[in-house]
Amino acid sequence: MEFRLLGTVSVETLTGPLPLGPAKRRSLLAALLLSANTPVSLGRLTECLWDDEPPSQARGVIQGHVSRLRALLAGADAEAYGVELATLGDAYVLRAPETLLDSQRFEELLMLAREQRGPADAVLMLKEALSLWQGPALSGAFAGPPLRVAAHSLEESRLATVEQLARAYGALGEHHRAAALLTAETAAHPLRESLAAELMLALFRAGRQSEALDRFHRTRRLLADELGIDPGHELADAYALILRGAPGPTGAAPPKSAEASPAAGPSPVAVPPGSGGSPGDGGPSRVAGSPSRSTEGPSRVAGSPSRSSEGPSPVAGDGADAAAPAPPRPPFQAAPPSPAGEPHPVDLLPRAPRGFHGRAAELAALSRSAAGEAPVCLVTGPAGVGKTALALQWAHRNPALFPDGRLFADLRGFSAAGEPALIDVLREFLLALGVSPRRVPESVPAAAALFRSLTARRRLLVVLDNARDSATVRTLLPGGAGCVTLVTSRHRLEGLIASDAARPVPLDTLETDDGTALLAGVLGEERVLAEPVAARRLSELCGGLPLALRVTAARLAGRPRWTLAALAGELADERGRLAYLDVDDTGVAAALRLTVQHLPPGAVHQLARLGHHPGGHYDPYTAAALAGTDPVTARAALERLAAAHLVTETAPGRWVLHDLVRLYARSLDPASAREALIGVLDHCIATALAAADTAEPGGEPCFVLPEDFRRPSAVQDFADRAEAMRWLATEREDLALTALAAREAGLDDRAWRIILLQWPQIVWRVRDSWSPLLELALESARAEKDAYAESRVLTLLGWVLTEEGRTAEAAALLERSPVLAREAGDPLGEATALVNLAVVQAELGELPIALENCARAIELARGEGDRHTEMLTLQHLARMHLTAHRPQEALDCARTALDLGPEHEEAARRSLLLAVCGEARLALGDEEDGVRLLDRAAQEAERAGYDEGAVRALEALLRVSSRTEFRRRHDEALRRLAEES
């Protein structure tokens, strides 16, 4: 067990975080943890939970949160860890070993760091301390004034630790690490002068004097603009040190001027044997700034112009006796100005993208990823999402970071033309860096080695666009610590992350506003502003995919008389949407086709079948049912599709398809649509049966399977009722869409079963708008001319209408239900129908006939030996007697029902029966026993999460008692119901 304050307030256990619930409960926990093992008064807790005047029931609210926290801790076996939440008079104390609290471990690590003799050991301790932070302190809690002060204090301690770690790096001479660490923090805290001063010194000691001075002037201007003050002594002292050229206590002597530094000159490179040249071939050559190219064979890297020169430029150090290499230039060191007459640094980047919009977060993430030593930045995302545009936008925005040039290669990993040979890409890079064509090695390993050697002391950007696999990228990585490699790919390239610590920057679709701005960038703002609603609709229909938006804009740009609304109407038809999103050789379908053609057959088969799923989400069981495989095979295929960004994992074991990918997938194998649909329908029936059987083991409303039912290869197991009910709640929307698809496909025998099998959730959340879905089930049952199905659906629909207050409609439906059940030979169905009909009749004042129907239902249930249905009937009969002012008969019926059911009988039913007993005892004059039974009924409902039952019991209690606790619990149950509705 672990308590966390350094980030989201949470309690971590071996089985995952405890479900702490609302923000105020987290605030209560935070307040107790900040004073762990010390009593915290009720007044102090009130200050932490409310910003202004607390409500009159504040004490009750706090008591409720404490009670819930106690229950959660007890369920997590907190006592075994020495954890106890105790009440001490008018205060509470959370007793826990300090080792379980992340803020205490943070302080302990800081103390250990101060005790270390060497900076290397201190670095380890400080890094370990900072790794405990998972975000801003006390996140997820409602921060009353005391908690805001505590969060600020913790953040100050973290920032001081960052500064301490930077100084420890400086003591080790690792100034580039100190600068990278401080740059990110300074961006988040631009007005913190101590951070800015430390960053200036780190940059200066890393040989980046101009950046250090620029940082001072930016901070000075910011302080003046935002606060109207001048820099303090820390900033001023750091500025003076840099101007004097004094490194300060932890630095080395500053570098000499760039013009005189060996690092600014050529870097000696030994040409490998057999490279086709010798010292005498045209003399030695030199690489400096931007090399000239030989006219003997200029070629092009994808997207780059060819460059010519007056002749080959030799490479310095062409023999084994070359001078010793100069010390490496630190990352991001400013380059010396090129002497007059020298060419500019090499730049092979294609032009910057036009009409680029949004992506501020991703551009910032790239800047953060590019900091540090020899970073590899990995931009990944689906086809058409704008990976190349993002990479080029960032590269063009940051030319000063790469004074030695920018290289670019389109690796065509997903192109119909095929990938270029690695030797060709390396040749283009080497030629761009000034190597004579005659001296480019013929083998890939030798050319890669020469490329790494030439880039070892330079600050280059290498953009590798459209990479398909990690191995290709590794061969093309530069050798310099100051080089940045920017890779784009439709695959996740996890191998590159593992081997080269590549820093992923995933790219998702555009938000609607950014998509609309992209359209305006192509069409002009006037045209978009003239139809703002249609523009937003177009952005939504394109799914925020930049490629689709650009194709849409291209169609409209070429047709100035078309309205945006007209095109939106065309795109709304799914059958032709992909065709409209293709123009010339560019389009969504073409881009997706290039991705799919590189997939293994099993993954393509799975993708094609996913397109026929009526719902929006997939788990391995659903995917297996669609594809006719098993869950293990399906999961592997889903993982492969996720790696190619064709599906997205939204939660562990749960995936979704982008709308346009779904349309494309559907086109891969249209003939399999019905087979895939039947497979997923039968999967839904089998899984819903398992869920209903687990949630309500005593009831089986529709166990008869369709005649041609295809049992899935595997059916999900449910450990307990809670897990089964959670599945029914999570899958409600997809089950509804699947049932609708079954109805439209004429598979009515599946449609009504899928809906009716959700009955445990329908009964549990009866007022949660189930009528439209049950009416669809009724249509399907009648289309099948199935008396059994129609009776069962009418019975459940009538019950829902009764609970919604539509009593007359319910009575009209329920009159026919027992007759149909009798025709179908379904005595238990007839009994349930009679009970629901009796409830309506009693509400309409027809109590005698209602009692007769209940008696008949009990007779049928006993004839079938079904205690579950008998209990149900007795429960409603007891309520009718109570309404008719017959408390003794109500009490007798409820007690008989409770005697029928075992202790583990479903909690909701027990709660309702206990409530009847309590109300009956009150009516008989026994107030003490009545209050006790009603309180017990409310507690059982609260423990089971049955808020409707809790509200009913507590309302009855409040009619005879004014206890604050009952009012608080009643209000909390009502609030939970409102949140769930």
Image (cartoon, helix red, strand yellow):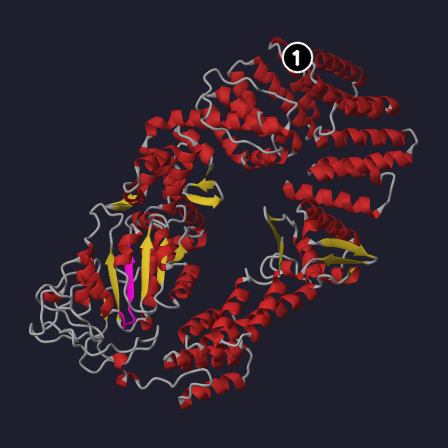
Q: In screen coordinates, is 124 left or right of 269?
A: right
Q: Please, is residue 340 above or below residue 723 in the view?
A: below
Q: Which of 383 and 563 is in front in this view?
A: 383
**Residue that carries the numbered disc 1 in the rendered image:** 827
Q: Residue at point 71% right, 32% down?
A: 907
Q: Residue furthest right?
A: 925
Regarding residue 244, the answer to whether it shows in the image is yes
**Residue 700 x/y as whole percent:** 61, 21
Q: What residue type is labelled 1?
A: Pro
Q: Which of 514 and 766 is in front in this view?
A: 766
Compared with 42, 77 (above or below) is above
State the image coordinates of residue 413 (x, y, percent, origin top left).
Answer: 26, 50
User: Compared with residue 327, is residue 521 higher up or lower down, i.e. above or below?
Assistant: above
In magenta, the rendered stretch is 456-466
Q: Mark 1, residues whose alpha carbon is within 10 Å: few (<14), some, or many (≥20)? A: some
Q: Residue, x 55% and y 62% (percent of image)?
A: 133
**Residue 259 pos. (x, y %):** 26, 84
Residue 576 in view (yes/no): no
| Residue 544 placement, left or right of 118 | left
